[in-house]
Amino acid sequence: MSTSTAMTSAYLEFDTKFWKIETDGSETTVTYGKLGTDGRVQVKDHGSDDKAEKFAEKQIASKIKKGYEKKDGGKKGGGRKGGGKKATKKAAPKKKPAKKSKKSTSSGDGVEGKTFCVTGTLSKPRAKIQALIINAGGEVKSGVSKALDVLVAGADGGSKLAKAESYGIEIWDEDQLMENLGADMEEEEEEAKPKKKPAKKPAKKPAKKSKKAATNGIEGKTFCVSGTLSKPRSKIQALIASAGGVIKSGVSKSLDVLVAGTDAGSKLAKAESYGIDIWDEDQLMENLGGDEDMEEEEEEVKKPSKKRGRGAKATTKAAPKKKKAKTKKEEDIEEMVCRNL
């Protein structure tokens, strides 16, 4: 019996999630899920020890790039009684939506440039799942063919699932898709909740600043607006855009500034964990150049012209009265007077 090469084993954590990979000869075993749970298990045979080791190294590098951190041997890992090899051998949860084909690999391979088909019952509307795939650069197909890259299968995957397994197509469940998308669905659900009316009293500053806020303006920076502000969010976003800023809908490591009002929710926590600049509304106004940008001045109503006073008529000189024409009799009398003189 031939001896296998050195076994690779790595345990990583990120936020509330864990991820572990082990190689055993030509096989890799991946366990992933939320901390404090047994997680999900995936086993894949790569055909050779060398390919298994390369696959493990690639997956570990991908996870670290996404923000995962290595921990000591998985002792703090996924199982309820800690991680380790026993946790990787436990059966998957009962409510497993679909059986994985042999070609199915652990998550982390990304979405961009791949073709996807969505089938079965998922926790979110199918249209929303498809929109997330498209936004991440994937292409959605209506049916299963040999050219398909990934089938996203929920419960009751039906004939599409069977067809994908027969073709050896990669099969993901909803959790794998979300992990590859890097999408935080809780943020979107929070945005959909009705927003609370702002209190009459001046609101307290929403959060402790993670960095000293920049004072060099708006132009060229990326912004995300979250929470309840004193002015409509659309107007705040329009002001930022008109000042040369770029509006983003979500928080990522490339974001420059989060403008946070009250009840900013998970976006605020995420921004703090990434060390992103956090501004309140006053700081935003200061960088925009003041409150005068927030309200458009109304045009002054033209006042009606003043009526002329009584004195105005008096200033107008009266036209000289015309002399009354002399009668024939008056002319004769005047002529007689002149002769006597």
Image (cartoon, rainbow, N blue to C red):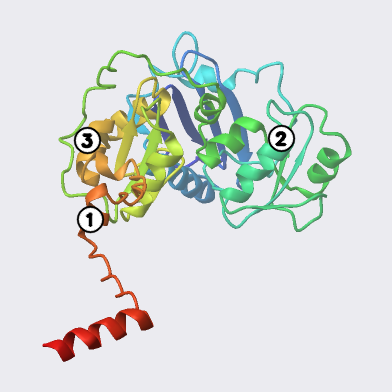
Q: Is residue 111 left or right of residue 62?
A: right
Q: Residue at x 47, y 49 (%)?
A: 54
Give the label on residue 283, or none: 3
Q: Which numbered disc, 3 or 2, marks the residue that appears first in the sequence?
A: 2
Q: Going by the image, does 178 lie left or right of 211?
A: right
Q: Quadrant of the C terminus?
A: bottom left
- Counting from the top left corner in percent of width and height, residue 194 is at 54, 21
Q: Residue furthest bottom?
A: 339
Left or right placement of residue 59 versus residue 102 in this view? left
Along the line of sight, the residue nearer the viewer: 105 or 44: 105
- Coordinates of residue 227 in the picture (x, y in percent): 40, 26
Q: Secondary structure at mark 1?
A: helix
- Snapshot quadrant of residue 127: top right
Callout 2 amino acid: Lys
Q: Nearer the viewer, mark 3 or mark 1?
A: 1
- CA–CA distance in space, label 1 to label 2: 105 Å
Q: Amino acid at mark 3?
A: Gln
